[in-house]
Amino acid sequence: MLRTDTVRNILSWYEGETPGLKANLSRLLMHGRLAGTGRLVILPVDQGFEHGPARSFAPNPVAYDPHYLYELAIESKVSGYAAPLGLLEQGADTFAGEVPLILKLNSGNSLVSGNDQALTGKVEDAMRLGCVGVGFTIYPGSESSYEMLEELRELSLQAKSRGLMTVVWSYPRGGKVTKDGETGLDIIAYAAHMAALMGATIIKVKLPSDHIDLDAAKSTYEKYPLETSNPAERVKHIMQSAFNGKRLVVFSGGGHKNETELLDEVRAIRNGGGNGSIIGRNSFQRSKSEAIKLLNDVMDVYA
Amino acid sequence: MLRTDTVRNILSWYEGETPGLKANLSRLLMHGRLAGTGRLVILPVDQGFEHGPARSFAPNPVAYDPHYLYELAIESKVSGYAAPLGLLEQGADTFAGEVPLILKLNSGNSLVSGNDQALTGKVEDAMRLGCVGVGFTIYPGSESSYEMLEELRELSLQAKSRGLMTVVWSYPRGGKVTKDGETGLDIIAYAAHMAALMGATIIKVKLPSDHIDLDAAKSTYEKYPLETSNPAERVKHIMQSAFNGKRLVVFSGGGHKNETELLDEVRAIRNGGGNGSIIGRNSFQRSKSEAIKLLNDVMDVYA
Amino acid sequence: MLRTDTVRNILSWYEGETPGLKANLSRLLMHGRLAGTGRLVILPVDQGFEHGPARSFAPNPVAYDPHYLYELAIESKVSGYAAPLGLLEQGADTFAGEVPLILKLNSGNSLVSGNDQALTGKVEDAMRLGCVGVGFTIYPGSESSYEMLEELRELSLQAKSRGLMTVVWSYPRGGKVTKDGETGLDIIAYAAHMAALMGATIIKVKLPSDHIDLDAAKSTYEKYPLETSNPAERVKHIMQSAFNGKRLVVFSGGGHKNETELLDEVRAIRNGGGNGSIIGRNSFQRSKSEAIKLLNDVMDVYA
Amino acid sequence: MLRTDTVRNILSWYEGETPGLKANLSRLLMHGRLAGTGRLVILPVDQGFEHGPARSFAPNPVAYDPHYLYELAIESKVSGYAAPLGLLEQGADTFAGEVPLILKLNSGNSLVSGNDQALTGKVEDAMRLGCVGVGFTIYPGSESSYEMLEELRELSLQAKSRGLMTVVWSYPRGGKVTKDGETGLDIIAYAAHMAALMGATIIKVKLPSDHIDLDAAKSTYEKYPLETSNPAERVKHIMQSAFNGKRLVVFSGGGHKNETELLDEVRAIRNGGGNGSIIGRNSFQRSKSEAIKLLNDVMDVYA
Amino acid sequence: MLRTDTVRNILSWYEGETPGLKANLSRLLMHGRLAGTGRLVILPVDQGFEHGPARSFAPNPVAYDPHYLYELAIESKVSGYAAPLGLLEQGADTFAGEVPLILKLNSGNSLVSGNDQALTGKVEDAMRLGCVGVGFTIYPGSESSYEMLEELRELSLQAKSRGLMTVVWSYPRGGKVTKDGETGLDIIAYAAHMAALMGATIIKVKLPSDHIDLDAAKSTYEKYPLETSNPAERVKHIMQSAFNGKRLVVFSGGGHKNETELLDEVRAIRNGGGNGSIIGRNSFQRSKSEAIKLLNDVMDVYA
């Protein structure tokens, strides 16, 4: 399939980047069911680190095997597969080149408290495993946030200068951010903007609620009102905050209680101009056939 | 336009620097409406990091688009454009060489408390984006101040040895500095002097009030009185503190309530021998035509 | 002895690694009594650091001499010998090539409190001493855990790029882990999974009890029940958590009170699909002939 | 003027150093009015950092201009001029080679509390500015003292290996040192000895009082009494503590209330075998002619 | 004098080391009165750092002069001289090659509290001064102990790879170690063992008392009793803990009240198989002739 105009246009936004990075971004955008559409569905598997193996894989025990996760990503024809080091290593050779890979460079776990993550992978690892990019989580607001931004800046320069994209999970928490604020519209917009300012190629945020969290921001949102009750309008504001839509933004979460609600959220993302979804537990915690069906339903919306 | 004697004289002050740095300083001083005058008006856009996207761009939503900010800087003929990494990247190729660029290397945000900033850009980034210089904020007085000075020293040597100017935002806060003291005359003079001692090519401070903050300094200001009620005399003291006027100093703030007061402040800066203004929100938060008009009114004063 | 299909199969799991690392892993798996079986018994001697010399060696004073420990490892035909720097240095030349060596890179001691270890060896040391791999302890849950993970990541890349295996002692403690939880089934499974995600070649954990420690995990273990009263089933769950058995896992501890119980535990490890045992004090604190007899009884189970 | 035997003898004390460093030390000792005498008077200007510009320069406003300070150092024929980065840069080319320069590598300021300084210059800066040496302050006793010693050790090796001298400002404070102890005889002796042990080429301490501060030292000073009421004898003890006089030591302070007392102190330094004085505020805070007169009166004593 | 079999045997223990390091160890063992005996008496002078100049040198003021200390080391024919940077520099050229030198790389001082030391020398310094080795203090048990171990590991690899020996002062304090425990038999044995595990070439500990400090160790010492009332048996246990006597251990302290008791202690060291003594204040705080006499009396015991 030849590169589409849509993708060509997206690449034009990344004018500050090297041809190598654009080639890898193009690989991601031209892969799988959504190839050429400018939309992305990514399979992330970092729950093992975050919640432990049983809570992640007991519902569908074949997923304990890293090869299964590769197969799911390949057979479902999602755009890419993002995971920490060990998971990518165990399959990197068998499935070399079959699906775009994103190495997650930092990870948290639920044995410790606090809003921080450990560096668990290196840009060199992403190179040797043939990844198209690296992933990194920041917690804007947390007591570790400046340090995380600085780590991102270092890793980002390393990655970009080697032609690797950066995917930034921007999850505000701590500091002046309340619990509700973690998915507040103003906070998510801020989180997306901050990731864009840091030079992220792709930004990953949670689907925002209609809550406005920061007192300092309330007057602005009152003076320049948005139709905050409409999820698509909220997505639109996030895209606006991502350089007026000139950065790719993918979404997760959203509080859906079933598949119907999930697909409603996906439609809101599409209608608001969002670039796609990251779908983890909803895919690998059900049987492969069910997962493929759900992922295809989602991709149907975006296609 | 040939280099003027005024600019030639300014370059002579930077006798410790390389020809590469002087070339970049000359590019800044010979660009735009104020070319050759030794005065500067710079467009800074770091509010997105500092206050979030809506508070920065909702009043004039086209400014969500980084290209708009480049266009504003170019069309208004200001001397230069200063912004964090993401904003400069998104436009660096389209507008290559059309306006002198300053990459801001550190940034704070309003989700966390405390007087510190994160390193969010690198000297290598400034090189690849074709900048004439780098910007860096220090908070003299704060609990992070010594660390910030040390970061500045490292980045400064890196930048200068590659021919890049350093623009130092010197904003005292914390420590022995009271809230009023942040714009106190003695404190701003100290802040400007400290930036000069650190080797800053251009110093950015707030327009000082007539408040004297440090007890230890009061007897000096009583013994050697200044006409502190006169804003131009206050600017003059700041210039004196910047190596007797041999370092370029630009000003922001000043507490103006409308355009008339803003232009009064600009006249005080000019009359006191200051080198110009940094004008952010007053420009990008109004329509392009209004912004260009205001910037030209300001530059009329300096021209 | 030619490489067996069992070993060939194990090597195939490490598809992300260099031929150099696989060669060293093969050396370990093809050495000693258990050569070719895919099972391992390793002699570790880090008790001197952990508990001091008398508590370690007074019961069998010839063991104060590092040469004795080499001889024990060689004559008993265990798979490998793991120890800190000084112990390996004192014998490295005399016994060069006679037994696969693993240099332990960090160590704690019982003069200080807290859950941390000091870096006491370097990858360069492992190279010059002819080791097949390096060992590293992490304490998931502890206040130092993120730092330890980051140290592991650095050392791991250094080691692997030089063809050295990494053996990760994953010992949860502190944070949200209770005292009982340190050997809890969910916690040990998490610990093994985390080591696998970090890229460990061989994982070392304690034999788990049937205790479930994390509240957040209890519902999962209730919904997807395991036969937790059966030690072999518990081992099986650990192996499942180690990439569905595609990472080598060796066990220690288990609370046995005598040799009979120890051998019962070994049978449980074998029956659950575990890859072997690490046996320290039970070997070097008795006479050489008794130690060799015990080690051979253990290896009989695995052979 | 040919090198004198006195200087030749002094150089012989620095037997561990490179010819490059000895050449720079010789340049300092063979410059100005005191050339060849083995005595030194140095003009230091770090008050701008320490106390701010007005408290430093308002009494003699021409001193706001860095060129003035160079001229003062040159015309008064003192041995050398020591200042932080910015001050040396602004004049380095105009006055290249006219006076030996010492770049102060760290600085404190009075906006923050605590006994520490920030690194504000680098050895590379000293090289490019043509300095003969670098200056560094340590605060023995303070909570930062070990870190400051370690910074000194790093910078010292860098400087010396490039032929630059090190001048160590050794100012005890904090820890077990009382306020009176900061100039106590035992403490200053300790401070001078510590600087010598760190490898300082020239040691800068305050003129000691007759106070003995550390309880642990009192019995020693009682058992081996010094004529502590005689300032020259106190200086002699400091010189003794500086490798029996084989390290150059210069003094500041002393609590003089007028010029007569200042010259008395200088005579005590000379009579006790001290190598000279550092005279800052007493010189640049009065008119140039008065300053030159005072500096010459001081040098008359040493000549 | 040709290398003796005793020395040849000692060198054979250091089988993990380079020929360069063994050459330097041989130089130390073949120097002075005890050449060839496998015993060592070393002159250490770090009291100036630890206690200040007067408490160190006032009893014998000629010792303020670093040359005196070199002369004492040379004329008394001790095995080597250990001191911090400044002391070795001042004499390194004059006495080049006349006595084996050990550069102490870290030092504490009595102006600050706490159990830590500052890095005050570098391996590069030891190289340029022609030393045979470097010295480093660790405080096992202290809150800085893991950091000190890590510094030792870095410096040790640097030193050894350049052929320099490491002499480790292992002085337990803080943490679980009581005041009495600092010289407790179990603690000193642990300290010696830890230094050996860190790869120390020569271990320096205090002569142990018969106190057993750690509760966890008491049962071991009861079950496997030593004749703890006999100082020579205590030394023997320390040697046992130092790889069964295959690491060189030298002793200091011991609580002697006069020369007779000192020599008794030396006999205990000799009889227990210890390798020698470090004798500082007892030598340089008396006149040179008395010091030489005492050192010779000590060496008579070991010869």
Image (tube, coloured by chain):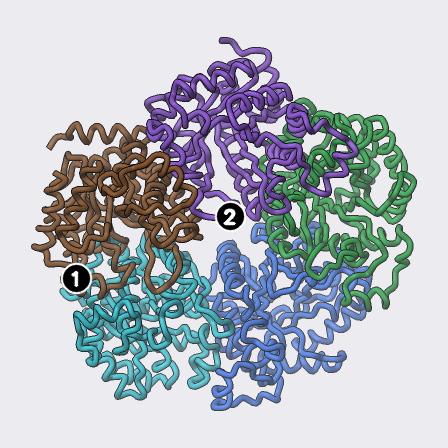
Chain colours: A purple, B green, C brown, D blue, E cyan
Answer whether residue A294 is visible to the viewer in this image: yes
CA neighbours of label 1 inside 10 A, class few (<14), some (14 to 19), many (20+): some
Say what amino acid the circle numbered 1 marks: Arg
Q: Quadrant of residue D55?
A: bottom right
CA neighbours of label 2 inside 10 A, class few (<14), some (14 to 19), many (20+): few
Tell me the element at label 1: helix
Q: Chain of mark 2?
A: A
Q: Name the quarter where the C terminus of chain A is drawn.
A: top right
Residue C207 spot, x, y in % from top left: 26, 46
Residue D158 spot, x, y in % from top left: 50, 55
> Which residue is located at x 20 percent, y 76 percent?
E270
Residue E27 spot, x, y in % from top left: 26, 64
Answer whether residue D74 is visible to the viewer in this image: no
Describe residue C30's horizontal placement relative to residue B183 as left or right: left
Describe residue C205's horizontal placement relative to residue C174 as left or right: left
Q: Nearer the viewer, residue B149 or A293?
A: A293
Residue that mark 2 sits on: A114
Residue B237 spot, x, y in % from top left: 83, 55
Say what amino acid the circle numbered 2 marks: Gly
Q: Nearer the viewer, residue A73 or B100?
A: A73
Q: Nearer the viewer, residue B9 or D9?
A: B9
Residue D72 drawn above or below residue C107? below
Tell me the element at label 2: loop
Describe residue C10's horizontal placement relative to residue A266 as left or right: left
Residue that mark 1 sits on: E8
Q: Chain of mark 1?
A: E
Q: Nearer the viewer, residue A140 or A265?
A: A265
> Which residue is located at x 14 percent, y 47 percent?
C263
Q: Nearer the viewer, mark 1 or mark 2?
A: 2
> Which residue is located at x 40 percent, y 43 percent?
C154
